[in-house]
Image (spheres, rainbow, N blue to C red):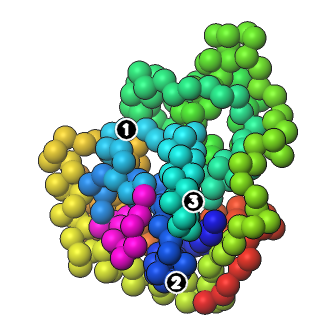
Amino acid sequence: MIIITGTTATGKTDLADKLAKELNGELINFDSRQIYKELNIITGKDQPKAKIWLYDIVFPNEYFSSFDFVEKIRPIIKDIIKRGKTPILVGGTYFYLKHLLYGLDVPPVPADSKLRDKLNNYSVLKLQKMLRKLNPNVLKTMNNSDINNPRRLIRKIEIYKQVKKFESLKVKKTNLKTLKPYNLETTKFIGLRYKNKEDLIKAIKLRVEKRLKQGAIEEVASLLKKGYKETDPGLKTIGYQQIIKFLQDKISKEKAIADWTNKEIQYTKRQLTFMKKDKNIKWREI
């Protein structure tokens, strides 16, 4: 198995495509934005030459967690190997990858679609208050990014509601070794990152400009026209949120573009912070 990860705008898909050709491989996406149908331009869903799995599997108004991801990807990996091909995982959502390879310290609480539909309309502040009520100490264990991430907050609420409901279900530290489904010693783990911060910022700016030329604003307008809302999980995404504010006349076009670019840069920094902790990743600088 080959895993290609890294920060935004580093050419992960191009490398994966090249390796798929050389090694008789099939690609599997682990980008949390590209799993959504109809989100194509802003997410940079460039269609690779090789077959790719886990593109376009849920609608923008559907919640998709790392649990859902692991449930979907395991049989795909098994099938690719069974057919004598090489599974090549490509993407930048490290949380998905971490859950797949190492497991998570949470109980196996199933998804609650009714609860998620209700909570999707709540503000981040309201979600934080709700979670604090369920578990006064849980916010102290979360980093700043997760505390302000509606999807992570909703999942925590989902878990602790179940824990409270069923007293027999307790949150325990999981033995991570027992959750490793793959032999990491035989897995090639490649990480791509920019050597210079200036090159990264330049690449992100060019990427945003390219998406705008491809019709990013028109894509968002079309999604809103179809009835999707800014509170839908798929649209709570960098790029979409900023353009929605522009279309609602809340900010100027210039402000939307600047905010989109800055958010992408900030997201990339967070990506790298988490990925650097994984000693299995062999980094390649570009």
Vertical order, 279 against 183 (above or below): below
- Numbered mark located on residue 22 in the image: 2
Where disc 1 sits, the SS reads loop
Whether residue 149 appears in this view of the structure is no
Q: Residues within 10 Å of mark 3 (few under 14, many from 20)?
A: some
Q: Residues within 10 Å of mark 1 (few under 14, many from 20)?
A: some
Q: In the image, 248: left or right of 143?
A: left
Where disc 2 sits, the SS reads helix
Whether residue 282 appears in this view of the structure is yes
Q: Residue at 48% of width from left, 24% of height from top? A: 112
Give me the C-alpha separation between circle 3 and circle 1. 30 Å
Give me the C-alpha separation between circle 1 and circle 2. 36 Å
Looking at marks 3 and 2 on the same chain, the residue that comes earlier in the sequence is marked by 2
Q: Residue at 81% of width from left, 41% of height from top? A: 178
Q: In the image, 54: left or right of 128?
A: left
State yes or no: residue 49 in magenta. Answer: yes
Looking at marks 1 and 2 on the same chain, the residue that comes earlier in the sequence is marked by 2
Residue 269 is drawn in which quadrant?
Answer: bottom right
Mark 1, residue position: 62
Looking at marks 3 and 1 on the same chain, the residue that comes earlier in the sequence is marked by 1
Q: Amino acid at mark 1?
A: Glu
Mark 3, residue position: 81
Residue nearer the viewer, 276 or 87: 87
Give me the C-alpha separation between circle 3 and circle 2. 16 Å
Q: Residues within 10 Å of mark 2 (few under 14, many from 20)?
A: few
Residue nearer the viewer, 150 or 28: 28
Q: Amino acid at mark 2?
A: Glu
Magenta span of residues: 41-53
Where's the C terminus, which quadrant?
A: bottom right
